[in-house]
Amino acid sequence: MISSSRLRSLAASAVLLAAAAVAHAQAALPNVVILATGGTIAGAGASAVNSATYAAAKVGVEKLIAGLPELSAIANVKGEQVFQVASESMTNDNLMTLAKRVSALSKQSDVDGIVITHGTDTLEETAYFLTLTVHTAKPIVVVGSMRPGTALSADGALNLYDAVSVAGSKDAVGKGVLVTMNDNIDSGRDVSKSINIKTSAFSSQWGPLGMVVEGRNYWFRAPVKRHTMNSEFDIDSITALPNVGIAMGYEGVEPTAIEALGKSGVKALVHAGTGNGSVANRIVPYLQKVRADGAIVIRSARVPDGFVLRNAEQPDDKYDWVVAHDLRPQKARILAMVALTKTSDTKELQRIFWEY
Ligand code: DGL
């Protein structure tokens, strides 16, 4: 017959053993920090059928984490609410604050990976900025959703689960900033929002780096452009971002926008030209004046894919213009801002646009 005191001590030992087993299991899991900034992934709609009509940036990071208990099996997760904005309203100051927080966390030995939840409208710009300026090999994964968590077939929960899984993966180390949307793992440099209302909104013209399925990563290519540890730019030494604007080319275009940007004191003007970055002949003199006044002219294209060929549609050497290579205008602006913190030499800038 076992005495009651013996039973009590056995029960206490069992509890201690179970607690030790849980602690051991948790110690084996990666530590992932989720930095929340807002967007649809934090959105809420009036009803489950509101997959496109909702308010973004409503749900806090703790509620996002609590709503996904499956995360506790793949990582030790901590959340921080950096800000709560719809991403079309992000500012350069927001970008700097976020990047500096990511950089600081990446230096902590108790952080294995970082996830940033973000609105999808400008997610590609933030992801590129981080890949250019945060010096860490640890996985940084930016994630959003196209439907609010309140909607039927919402995509945010699985996107977030995938992001935490990838951020805690050893095989994601050193691959630059990543974006997990719709089962894909894209590079923060290449990915763009190409469809404004589908869960398959994000794509890279050079293809995703891989896929994540049920918590396992399947890699098919690696980034070839400079990023993170191999970048000459470091957010920890950037104190401010220069003003860089974008003007679009289209049939019947007038120089109004270019003149206004020039007068506003932009340090660079990205021209989103038609075709292969073409510039209407009546607009060329206005871009030449922007250059003559000391700002950099960067020829990009409104056509999403392909890349702008130097000296093809315009004599870039003669005009001392820079071409944006395969970067869409909004990405070219991000690289121009970062590059201008180091140089305004057009030959150096063109090298930077070839390499990043
Ligand atoms: N307002 C948009 C944004 O925050 C909603 C789009 C989204 O997050 O998916 O980017």
Image (cartoon, rainbow, N blue to C red):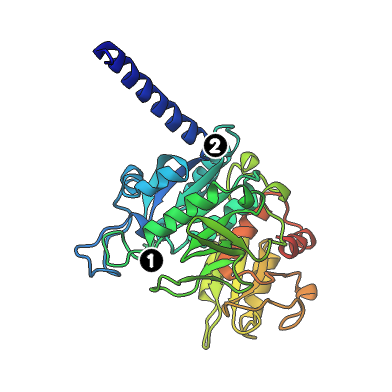
> What residue is rendered at 33% in x and 15% in y?
9
Label 1, label 2: how far apart the Cα atoms are: 28 Å
Sequence order check, earlier mark of 1 and 2: 2
Do we see residue 266 in this rendering?
Answer: no
Q: Give the quadrant of ligand 1.
A: bottom left
Disc 2 marks which amino acid?
Answer: Val
Quick one: quadrant of the C terminus?
A: bottom right
Residue at 47%, 42% (x, y): give it: 75
Indicate the quadrant where residue 199 lies: bottom left
Image spot of residue 225 (x, y percent): 71, 61
Percent across and percent down for residue 101 are: 52, 40
- The residue pinned by badge 2 equals 111
Q: Decide: marks 1, 2 in contact (CB < 8 A)?
A: no
Of 286 and 134, which appears nearest the observer?
134
Q: Secondary structure at mark 2?
A: loop
Query: Residue 146: which numbered mark, if any?
Result: 1
